[in-house]
Structures are given as C-alpha cells and as structure tokens.
Amino acid sequence: MRHKIGQWLLLGAASLALASCGASVSEEQSGNGEGTIELAEFPDRPYWGDTHLHTDNSIDAFGFGVRLGAEEALRFARGEEVTSTTGTKAKLARPLDFLVISDHSDGLGSTRRLYDAPRMLIQDETLLRWHDMMHESPQQSQRAVAEIIDGAARGTLPEALLDQAAAEENTRDIWTAHLDTLDRYNEPGKFTAFAGFEYTLMPGGNNLHRVVMFRDGSARTKTVIPYPGLDTGVEGLWDYMEAYAAATGGEALAIPHNSNVSNGMMFELTGPEGGAMTAEYARKRAKAEPVVEVTQIKGDSETHSFLSPNDEFAGFGDLGWELGNLSMTIKSTPDMYAGSYIREALKRGISIEERLGVNPYQFGLIGSTDSHTSLATGDEDNFFGKHTGSEPAITNRALNGQNLGTNAERFGWHYLAGGYAAAWARGNTRAEIFDAFKRREVYATTGPRMTLRIFGGFDFTEADWNGDWVRAGYSRGVPMGGELADGGKAPTFLISALKDPDGANLDRVQVVKGWIDASGEMQERVYDVVWSDMDSRRMRGGKVPAVGDTVDRATATYTNDIGTAELRSVWTDPDYREGQRAFYYVRVLEIPTPRWTLYDAVRFGITLPDAAMADAVAQERAYSSPIWLKPAR
C-alpha cells in the first residue's frame, strides 16, 4: 500500500532523466511547432510576456487554494476570459504575446494528487490528516502545505512520499501531459507557449530560485524531467541544462529571481561554499544565466536606497521585503544588501571581470509576476493577487499583512502588482523570443507596456532621428544587451521611450552608469537625460524638479495633464575615461499613478493603514538591459 500511495503523490525530488543521453534530435523532430512565418529584417517590436507563473501543479499554489491549471493559464494569457479560483471573472485588457508556466520542480503536482486521492486508500495517518485539511478550508489547506514543506526541509516526510521511482514516474506523467498542452496552445506568429519550471534552491530560507526556460517543443523537452531544488546545488542545474543541450541539440536558460530576499547570497563575490570564484565558475554562470528578473510581485530588486543614497528613485517596492530573507528566518542587515540587488551585482560583475577576465553577472533585465493564481496579471487596476488569498474577491486583501514572527508583516499591501518581460524579436515564435533573451535584447517593466529602445555606439547624432534610426542603430552600434569595445572615444546612445498607449505619460528618462575607477573601486551615477517640460522644469542643484501628481486619492484616478507621450535623446557619457570598464542601462519613469491598493480602497470602501496609504501612489518604471563598455584588447 505504501508504494500504491507513493504513486499518487510526488514529493520525492525529481532527478535528471535523459531518455537517451547519446541521442540527437533532428530539426524536423524538434517539435518546436514553429512552421514558417515571415520574420522582420530587424527586431521590430517588443513582445510582452510573463516568464514566472504558477498553476495548480505547484505544491504551494495548490495548497494556497488555486484550482486552475495550465489550460486556464494559457487561455487567460491569450486574452480569453476565465473564472478565477474564487469565482471572479478574469480577463486581461490586452493579451500577452508569450508565457512561461514555471511550476515548482519539487513536488510537481503532488498536492493536487494528494487532494484527489481516494480517502479510503490513504493508510498513512499523516497523509490522511493533510488530505482532510486540504478539503476542510483554504486556511487548513495552507497549513497542510506549510507542514509538507517543513517536513521536506527537515527530512521528516512520511515514508510513502520517499519512493524515488514512483516520484519520477509521476513527474514524467505530469510533465509529458503539460508539454502536450503547451504545444496545443503554441501558435507561431500569434502566441508563444514556452516549457519551463522553477528550480527552488533555498538554503536557510535564502532565495536562490531560478526559472528554467526551454527554447524547444515537446519532442526535445519530453526527454527530460524538471530538475529538483531540494538537496542540490545550482551548478548541478547548469550541468542539467548542458546535458540537455548536448543530448538533444536544444537550449535552455536559467533566470534568477527575487534576489532581494536572498540575504546577499544571489550575487556573491565568492564561489560556491565561500571559496574563491574561478574563471570557470564565472563563465559557466554567465552562459547559463543571460537574464535576471529585476522586478515582480514580491518586490523590486533594482537597487536599495542604502546602496544608492544619491538616487532619489532607489528602493522602489522595497517596503517589507528588505527586512529578511524569503521565509523571514534570518533578518537582513545592510551588509547583505550588496549581494541581493541587481545594480550592485552589475558593478560586482565588471569588478570580477577585471580580475578574472570573465563577467558572471553580465545579464539582461526582465520583469515577471510570480503569480500563484494561474493568472498572469501585472496591471495595477486588474491585479489578481499573489495567491488565492489575495484575489480581488478578498475585499480586505490589502490589509491582510501576515506576521512572520519578527514583528514584520508582508503579503498584504506590500505586494507589487507584478512585472512584465519585453523581448525585442523579429517575430512571435519560441526561437525568436528565446534568442532575444539569450542575447539580452530584453527589458523589464513594473507593469505598464511602455516601448523602450536603446543603441550604443560612438558616432550617433541627432540627425539619425531623421532617417532609419533603427537600421543605423544595428549597423553602427549595438542594441541593449550588447558590448562596445573602447576605442578611446566616449560612447553615445540613441534612446527612445514611448508611453504605454493605454497608460500614463512619461516623466523622465535616466541613464544609470556603473564603472570601475582608476583605483579599482566600483562607482555608480544616475544621469537625468531627457524629461517632460524641460523648459519649465530646469535642473536645480543637479536635480530635475518633480513632475507633479494628478492622482485623486478619493477616486483612484489620474490625468495625463502632466508628462509627455514620448521622450528621446542622443546622449554621450560626459564622464568617460579611456580604458574604463563600465555598463549603462536606461530607467524610464512614468508620472505618478494609483497602485492596486488605492484601487481596492476605493472599490471596497476600506481604509488603508497609514504606511500603505503613503505608498498608494507610485511612479511605475521600465529598466533596459545594460550595454557594456569594455577596454580594447
């Protein structure tokens, strides 16, 4: 009976299982499902997507209460109306172009299987108790999942869950069915459905999670099962990806996320276990992880005000998240921040490159949601929550802060509405969008869909705007994510930003530069490049005056009477020094707009706490991937 129940469940860690380690798969057999579609000469538009979404196959999402699967997630992302777990009709105002469903590899589908298991077949008392708790109420279901996760961490799971062979069999069954669903919904030219999973490494509660994203269709992805996070290390994940590529000819990449709750462990200066970082380790990481998730529901990881005290817009979405690691088992201290935030990681990367000759943190930037509702929503006025306990049907969801035993609360108004990933590609296919990620021609937003494009070179001028500036950008420079070789002349950037056509006007465009100075120290500076109403908003003391605020707090509305629809500039680094190793990325700010918490306060007639009310209006933003300036060899 023990093995019988073990086949119902899937809490044992999955292992790498290549169907034929020496086999290769021809292009005709790759299952990409791309067919033939017409591609643009150059990447011609940003394609919008979410690379971090959980369905009822994730152990925690199901335990939280979600009852929607991959089909509903894909239909919703494509723009169809679905009914959420809590019974609310849900629909995106605008469909997405692509989606990565990234259910947790550990325990894939296990809570759903325990919930569905016939009660009479469950002999183990602990399993039976968890089964009954899941059926009793959402609150009891969450408690059951918390016990399961704690048992996995402590090594005290019931023996029935430790049948490795049964676990792998169940993983393969669920994974295979999921991949078939993705192929059915993948429609080249219209909507792209990517295979993926979340690798959930979390030593001591410190978030070292990665989303793994595959380029390929099911003919290749069916030869593996998702790699586990429990009792493994991230280098094992990279080996798994390399083995997959060698055996199938396919490709996969990993996307670190939520570095803001890693307590400094995501972007360390050392190698594994605190040893010296080697060039081999740095090269392996750079190859496996070309992009990083800079913003999502659980906070924004661009930079912290402690790290960037001269940046007036630092610390977006930090409140409540900078206090501790993911589980709040270890309180965060300022000395940990540098390894937890992206800007500092970019600086560390060029410092390591100066020493080792390779940059482990040369990544592009994207946003995504990390929603556990099967609904990929990043819009403030259409936020469907992190999990079912924070869906719109929960009228006081903004007030439901959860005390985590450290006198700190999270999971109420602290949530951001999410983020999105934008990929500059020649067409909407798996190959084109994946390749945009791989070359880092991607950018992040906190939800709005503004269009952001930059090129770096050495001879751009204002006259380029009068011609085919995109062709000029590609022919005489590099796009976001690219590299420039220092030729003894200051780099110049073509920067173009357009407002979200359905959203708020733009306030300003900034360039964030990080560099290594002559003494080997890491430096940073934020430059205001172009902004709305420049004639009347003249710099004072090196700062651009605030754009203003049209938000009516009583009605959760705003007007576009301030700001502008378009900002563009040709900007040359005024502080260039020959031989200086540097990076440049662009940050675009909207005018102030209501957050989801203010929309909720008006919709449900609730009174927000003072701290939440002070944070009820924000300037949404976009972050480009950097362009790196490297000394001539």
Image: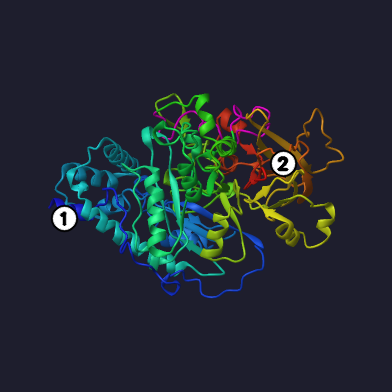
Residue that label 1 marks? 4
Q: Earlier in the sequence, mark 2 or mark 1?
A: 1
Numbered badge on residue 67:
none
Residue 227 shows in this picture: yes
Q: Amino acid at mark 1?
A: Lys
Query: Judging from the image, what secondary structure is the residue with disc 2 in?
Result: strand
**Horizontal arrangement in the rendering, residue 206 relative to residue 492 (left or right):** left
Observer-nearest of 131 and 292: 292
Query: Judging from the image, what secondary structure is the residue with disc 1 in?
Result: helix
Magenta part of the chain? 304-329
Residue 35, percent across and down? 51, 75
**Horizontal arrangement in the rendering, residue 343 relative to residue 539 (left or right):** left
In this view, 506 is above or below 540: below
Q: Residue 272 appears in which quarter of the rendering?
A: top left
Residue 467, percent across and down? 81, 62
Q: Amino acid at mark 2?
A: Gln
Q: Residue 501 appears in which quarter of the rendering?
A: bottom right
Observer-nearest of 567 and 92: 567
Numbered badge on residue 510:
2
The answer to if 110 sits in the magenta stretch is: no
The answer to if 320 sits in the magenta stretch is: yes
Distance (Cα) linking label 2 and label 1: 60 Å
